Amino acid sequence: MLLLAGSSFTQVQQQYLQANERGTLLLSDIEKYYLTVNEDSNQLMVPLTKYIPELQTPWPYASTNNFTQKILYQQPVALLRLPAAKALHAVADSLATLGYGIILFDAYRPYAVTELMWQYVPDERYTANPAKGSGHNRGATVDISLYNLATKQPLAMPTPFDDFRPMAHHDYMELPATVIANRALLRNIMEYFGFVAFETEWWHYSFKNHTQRFPLMNFSFQVLHRAYQKITR
Ligand SMILES: [Zn+2]
């Protein structure tokens, strides 16, 4: 039996995926996406603003204010798989009791953008190798930080978003106590609700078992958002 990346999906899901020229399995036919959702409602991509009204979305990839200095996103929509969105909703509820809200830098990212980032910065320390894809392409990963709900100001964190110095690592401790506490608070709450931290980026969290549960996708934000509206109307 030929084992390809993503072969741990069910046989049914597997048949909807297509290998690209790199041999990476992708879901890129929207009709097949509908079939996966029919078979497993957890595959549904949902807009996060439905679940988290207080979300701040600065969208660095929709401007030139990102590590590629290129505009990578057109009309982005914050989308995640249903169980990941529910878990992030629980995170937001829990944070709200402490007076904090979520800043979302990124959630779902079309596979084509992962390829584009790799073209600009072909370095696995900074960007996902398209041969493997990213949890963002699976609709199961978020890049997030915290803000104060009363003042709307961001909480102090170790570095800005997409800063790839060692200061961004979870084990970096030469920081003010408040910064360490803010980073730990985010991590503790995210882990409690089923997200897994990434040791070299304090902002990046993936929903548990995402590589087994959700295929890589290459759809625009608008195509997936319209699919959500069609499925739920
Ligand atoms: Zn990320």
Image (cartoon, rainbow, N blue to C red):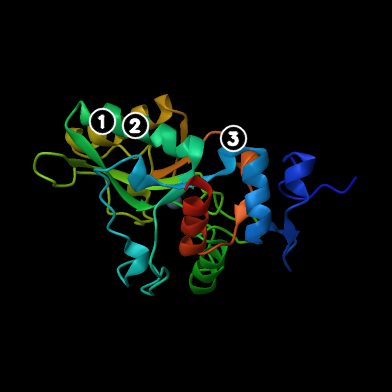
Q: Hey, which quadrant is residue 57 in on the image?
A: bottom left
Q: Hey, which quadrant is residue 122 in on the image?
A: bottom right
Residue 172 shown left or right of residue 205 in the figure: left
Picture mark count: 3
Which percent across, then down, holds residue 92? 30, 34
Q: CA distance from mark 1 to mark 2?
A: 6 Å
Q: Residue 125: in sight, yes or no?
A: no
Q: Nearer the viewer, residue 146 or 92?
A: 92
Q: Which residue is mark 2?
A: 91
- Classify 137 as above or below 149: below
Q: Looking at the picture, which amino acid does disc 2 mark?
A: Val
Q: Which mark is residue 209?
A: 3
Q: Which residue is mark 1?
A: 95
Q: Quick one: SS at disc 2?
A: helix
Q: CA distance from mark 3 to mark 1?
A: 24 Å
- Mark 1 crowd level (few <14, some 14–19, many ≥20, 10 Å Cα): many
Whichever of labels 3 and 2 marks the residue nearer the N terminus, that label is 2
Q: Do tag 3 and tag 1 residues touch (Cβ < 8 Å)?
A: no
Which percent across, then down, holds residue 155? 19, 42
Q: Looking at the picture, which amino acid does disc 1 mark?
A: Leu
